[in-house]
Image (cartoon, rainbow, N blue to C red):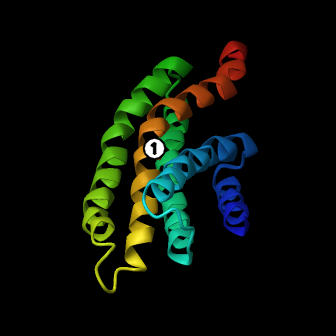
Amino acid sequence: MAALLVIFLLLYQEFKSTQTAGVILLNLPLALIGGIVAIAITSGDMSIPAIIGFITLFGIATRNGILLVSRYNALRSENISLVQRILQGSVDRLNPILMTALTAALALVPLALAGDKPGNEIQSPMAVVILGGLLTSTFLNIFVIPIVYYYMNRKEEKNA
């Protein structure tokens, strides 16, 4: 809970908007879904390494949300319509988001698969949580964040 508060405060400090910080924080439940499902499928045990994996996962998911929303906001200054801003911003940030997720996933697969080997009792649950959360947050981030951003900013578009 403290981590969420700190993340929210940092986002608010950066964007000066509770709405924008909220849109970015929407990535966290999307990541949480995958992490919890991954734990349920594998060991079913919530451990300290799994919790550390969630904290890491929240950082990656937040970064992905920041990439999208900051690009949308940057395109706002170019007087592009809201829909076009979301489409162009999403296309612009798709590669960096996918590359981050793919790189992390490829590094974590060996750790997740070697869970039964000695010494991997800590690394494996953490890797499983991060992999599961990356899968759901990356996939859902591409669809959910643009839709929520649109609904949060459509009034502004009508007033302009």
Residue 14 coordinates in the image, percent (x, y): 63, 55
Q: Amino acid at mark 1?
A: Thr
Instruction: Classify residue 38 by image quadrant.
Output: bottom left
- Viewer-nearest residue: 112 or 97: 112
Kindly give the residue lying farthest to the top in the view shown: 158
Q: Is residue 94 left or right of residue 144?
A: left
Residue at the spot 43% in from the left edge and 32% down from the top edge: 89
Q: Which residue is rendered at x = 44% and y = 69% of the image?
A: 125
Q: From the top left corner, tell me how far across and down residue 114 is, in percent.
A: 27, 72
Secondary structure at numbered mark 1:
helix
**Residue in the image at 52% along x and 50% along y:** 31
Q: Nearer the viewer, residue 160 or 144?
A: 144
In the image, residue 106 sits, relative to residue 84, either above or below, namely below
Q: Which residue is mark 1?
A: 136
Taking the image as shown, residue 40 lies to the left or right of residue 159, namely left
Q: Nearer the viewer, residue 151 or 119?
A: 119
Question: Does 147 sit above or below residue 14?
Answer: above
Residue density around tag 1, few if under 14, some if 14–19, many if 20 or more, within 10 Å:
many
Labels in figure, total: 1
Q: Which quadrant of the figure has residue 157? A: top right
Q: Position of residue 48 (x, y in %)?
A: 56, 77
Residue name at image x 68 percent, y 16 percent = 160
Residue 61 seen in the current view: yes
Could you tell me residue 4's position as x and y percent?
68, 61
* Quarter of the image with the N terminus in it: bottom right
